Image: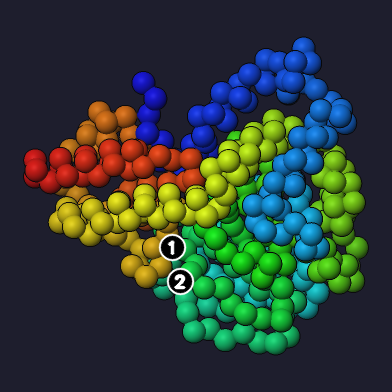
Amino acid sequence: MKKHNFSAGPCILPQSVFQEASKALLDFNNSGLSIIEISHRSKDFIAVMDEACSLALELLGLTGKGYKALFLQGGASMQFLMAAYNLLENKAGYLNTGAWSDKAIKEAKLFGEVLELGSSKDKNFNYIPKGFSIPNDLDYIHLTSNNTIYGTQLREFPTSEAPLVCDMSSDIFSRELDFSKFGLIYAGAQKNMGPAGTTLVIIKEGILGKVSRAIPSMLDYSVHASKDSMFNTPPVFAIYTSMLTLRWLKNLGGIAAAEKRNKEKANLLYTEIDRNPLFKGYASTEDRSMMNVTFNLTNDEHKDAFDTLLKEGNINGLNGHRSVGGYRASMYNALEIESVAKVVALMQELEKKA
């Protein structure tokens, strides 16, 4: 029986994508070859790469606006390094909202001065810092739009002359934003796009070439942009599956349709958390994430009973991160509202039994 998958990543993808990708594993485009054994230089795969990049820009509303879409490797963790390597000449500002921005700050300090604009570490990152000041001498500002571990999400993004750099690994393509406000966006594929193994990078080409240091070729955005993500052998299957997911999203109605679905799912679960006396939310109410809902039991004596209900209900991946505990429902674009309704029903069943 197929499980309801709330895993934080690698995570759920649309069933139609699984079906089409599985066919391509055996025979891609009636070529007699698998997608994982064709040359990345073949016309068939170049068409995949071109479509994936084109769809990414189209869905974000960035076509024809001076942006380049790249599919790279190394995950978002590599982007912590690459962003600073390519953009940090003197000083950068970082908003510290969780474990991933903490790691990004660590990497950036290798290349220049890092100013922590604000931090929510004092309350184990259960809120988004606000009212912080931004100096006018920054090379860029780095943000994490959604914090997977803690279940917080930025609602407003700062306005600055400095380029905005944003890690959108866990909420890209999930809500409408003015993406032209950003100079650089990066996102690991394994939450809203495809399997682990590739990272989408959207970069405004005009922000490159501003640092004086020599950059190794594999870490140089300009090199990857000039080679259309083909400087080295790309992760063919991960990019192909991402392309299928982006097709699915476009056919769904784009980001606007995804946001509508995501709001419905989030509202359903948060309403139950706030209503049910056996549960309490972890993140500050005004900063709650639509993608990752974090919550705890008000009394841990109910944990074994609730975990049993989840297992019997074929619920997968609902355990919270070790730094927060409790539960975390990761509700990415492909998750259907029926799965959320199942969890809500189990929460209500626990209440009746308590």
- Nearest the camera: 103 or 32? 32
Contact between marks 2 and 1 (CB within 8 A): the answer is yes
Q: Which residue is mark 1?
A: 152
Q: Amino acid at mark 2?
A: Ile
Location of residue 149 (image quadrant): bottom left
Q: Earlier in the sequence, mark 2 or mark 1?
A: 2
Seen at 71% across and 59% down, the residue is 62
Q: Amino acid at mark 1?
A: Thr
Seen at 63% across and 19% down, the residue is 23
- Nearest the camera: 139 or 106? 139
Q: In the rendered picture of this protein, how many numbered marks are placed on residues? A: 2
Seen at 47% across and 46% down, the residue is 332
Position of residue 111 in the picture relative to residue 348 (left or right): right
Residue lying furthest top: 32
Seen at 67% across and 20% down, the residue is 25
Q: Is residue 28 above or below residue 241?
A: above
Mark 1 Cα shell of 10 Å, populated few (<14), some (14-19), many (≥20): many
Position of the C terminus, as image quadrant, is top left
Q: Which residue is mark 2?
A: 128
Spot occupied by residue 293 in the image (x, y as percentages of width and height): 37, 53
Position of the N terminus, as image quadrant, is top left
